[in-house]
Structure formats: structure tokens, C-alpha cells
Image (cartoon, rainbow, N blue to C red):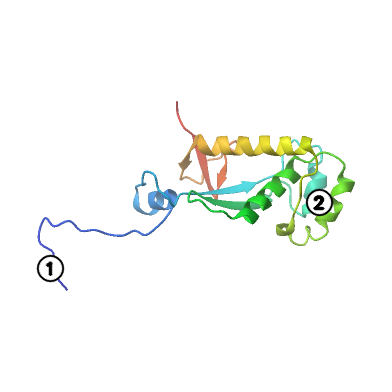
Amino acid sequence: ETDIPIGEPICENYGQKPNFRFLFYYGFTIDNNQDEVVYLKLYLNSDDPYLKFKENMLGIAHGQYIKQFTFREKIDNNFDHNNKMLGYLRFIEYDEDFNHIGKYFKTCKADKRKLRMPVMSIRNEKKMLTKLKTIAEKCLSCLLYTSDAADDMQCVDLGGRRIIKKKK
């Protein structure tokens, strides 16, 4: 043990954490934090004419999220993770002939993590990519709001916390 002289700076290492953890536990954030993370929950579209059918295929309750994905700011070449998310987005946006996709859902009801939906049509790919763009724009235009009481369902769900749009 060594005495610390008066006026000597003390350095503490908080470890690598995303900003929402720094803010919640310590009351500050770090600019350009390389450990930033976004938790993205995917839901079926509430106005989808096939909503009940899709909920039944997945074995989920009305309004329940399908799957949560975690994305880190650090470059992560986890292509399988990214392809899974794209498969879920394809399913969310799919509104064509459901007879063609039955083989992709044989095990899905028992374990929705096994959903693997490939490219089904150019039209559906456009819808899926438009949905992905909308999700990305919401994530980029929002700030983390640490109150779980925020009930603005137009925002992106970040692991139990809501984010709100930046004031312009």
C-alpha cells in the first residue's frame, strides 16, 4: 500500500461498456465509444394482413417480439448473425404465396431461432431493404432515453429501454 499525495490524480478503469451502461451506472457517457451497442427487437407489422397467420407460424403471442439482435459499433464480420436478421426481415415483409415458404418453418414453431428465409423475390427484397433502411434511420436519429416508462411505440426498442428522437 502506498499513500497518495494530496492533489495527485487518481485513475480508475471502468472497463469496456456501451454508453447506456456508463450513463445508467456512473452518470456519464464517452464520445466515440468503440463499445457502443444497439439491441434491436424485431416485431411483425401490426397492419400486416397476414399478421395472425405469421404469429401462428412462429408460435408467438400478438405484439410479442420475434427476435432480438445485438449490434456492436466495433466491426464484427459475423455474417451468420447478419443473415439471420435479414431472414427475419424477409419474413416480416413477406406477403406473397405462403405455400412456397412452408419448408422454412417446419421447426420454427418449436424454436423460432431456426427461421432461415432466403431471397424469395426481388419485390420482397426491396421491401426488406426498405424496412432495414427505416430501422437504421430510426437508430441513427435517436438518443438513448433511460426511463423504461417511455411509451412511445414509434421508437426502436433497445433492450428494455426506449430511445427518443433528437430535438432539432
Q: Nearer the viewer, residue 3 or 130?
A: 130
Q: Are marks 2 and 1 in contact (CB under 8 Å)?
A: no
Compared to residue 135, the image places residue 76 above or below, namely: below
Seen at 84% across and 49% down, the residue is 101
Q: Residue 20 placed where, x, y %?
A: 44, 49
Label 1: few (<14), some (14–19) or many (≥20) C-alpha neighbours in 10 Å: few
Residue 119 located left or right of residue 141? right
Q: Earlier in the sequence, mark 2 or mark 1?
A: 1
For residue 154, which quarter of the picture?
top right
From mark 2 to mark 1, how far is it between C-alphas?
66 Å
Label 2: few (<14), some (14–19) or many (≥20) C-alpha neighbours in 10 Å: few
Label 2: which residue?
56
Q: Secondary structure at mark 1?
A: loop
Seen at 68% across and 52% down, the residue is 84
Q: Nearer the viewer, residue 90 or 26?
A: 90
Q: Which mark is residue 67?
A: none
Q: Residue 60 placed where, x, y %?
A: 74, 53
Quarter containing the C terminus: top left
Q: Viewer-nearest of labels 2 and 1?
A: 1
Q: Residue farthest to the right?
A: 99
Q: Residue 123 placed where, x, y %?
A: 78, 35
Compared to residue 131, the image places residue 53 above or below, namely: below
Q: Secondary structure at mark 2?
A: helix
Seen at 37% across and 59% down, the residue is 15
Q: Residue 111 placed where, x, y %?
A: 74, 61
**How many numbered marks have been drawn onto this rendered protein structure?**
2
Compared to residue 147, the image places residue 112 above or below, namely: below
Give amino acid for label 2. Asn
Residue 26 located left or right of residue 62? left
Quarter containing the N terminus: bottom left
Give amino acid for label 1. Asp
Q: Which mark is residue 3?
A: 1
